[in-house]
Image: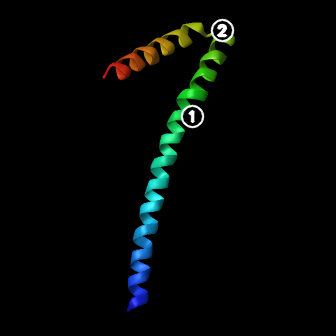
Amino acid sequence: MLSLLFIILFFMIFGRMIGFAFKATWGIFKVVTFLVFLPLILVGLVVGGLLSIAFPILLVVGVVNLFMRLT
C-alpha cells in the first residue's frame, strides 16, 4: 500500500516537472526565435533583393514591439 502511494506521488511530481519543462522550453524557443532567427531572416531577405517584403515585416514587428513596451 505504501509503495502504491509512493508511485502515485512520484508521478504527480514528475508530471509537474515535465509540464514546467515544456513551458520553459516554449519560452526559450520564443526568445531565440525573435532574437536570432527573425533578424537573420530579415537580413537574408534584404540581401536576396526582397526589400519590399522585409520592410513591412520590420515595420509590423517594430510597431508591435512599441505597443508591447508601452503597456
As drawn, which residue projects farthest toward the bottom? 1
Q: Nearer the viewer, residue 59 or 21?
A: 21
Q: Which residue is mark 1?
A: 32
Residue 67 locus on image (x, y percent): 35, 18
Instruction: Indicate the quadrant where residue 4 lies.
Output: bottom left
Location of the C terminus by quadrant is top left
How many numbered marks are there?
A: 2
Picture coordinates of residue 41, whole percent (x, y): 61, 22
**Residue type at the position of mark 1:** Val
* Relative image position of residue 65 (x, y in whole percent): 42, 20
Question: Answer yes or no: do the residues labelled 2 and 1 have beta carbons within 8 Å?
Answer: no
The residue that appears at 64% across and 11% down in the rendered structure is 46
Please tell me the numbered disc located at residue 49: 2
Image mark for residue 23: none
Residue 59, horizontal then vertical, whole percent: 46, 11
The residue sitting at the left extreme is 71
Left or right placement of residue 9 versus residue 29 in this view:
left
Under circle 1, the secondary element is helix
How would you rate the neighbour count of disc 1 (Cα within 10 Å): few for under 14, some for 14-19, many for 20 or more? Answer: few
Q: Nearer the viewer, mark 2 or mark 1?
A: 1
Vertical placement of 36 versus 5: above or below? above
Considering only order in the chain, which callout, 1 or 2, is on the residue closer to the N terminus?
1
Answer few, some or many: residues within 10 Å of disc 2's Cα (few below 14, many 20 plus, some between 14 and 19): few
Q: Amino acid at mark 2?
A: Gly
In the displayed structure, 53 sits above or below 71; it is above
Please, what secondary structure does the residue beneath circle 2 have?
loop
Residue appearing at x 44%, y 75% in the figure: 10
Identified at 42% across, 68% down, the residue is: 13
Q: Residue at x 52, y 34 (%)?
A: 31
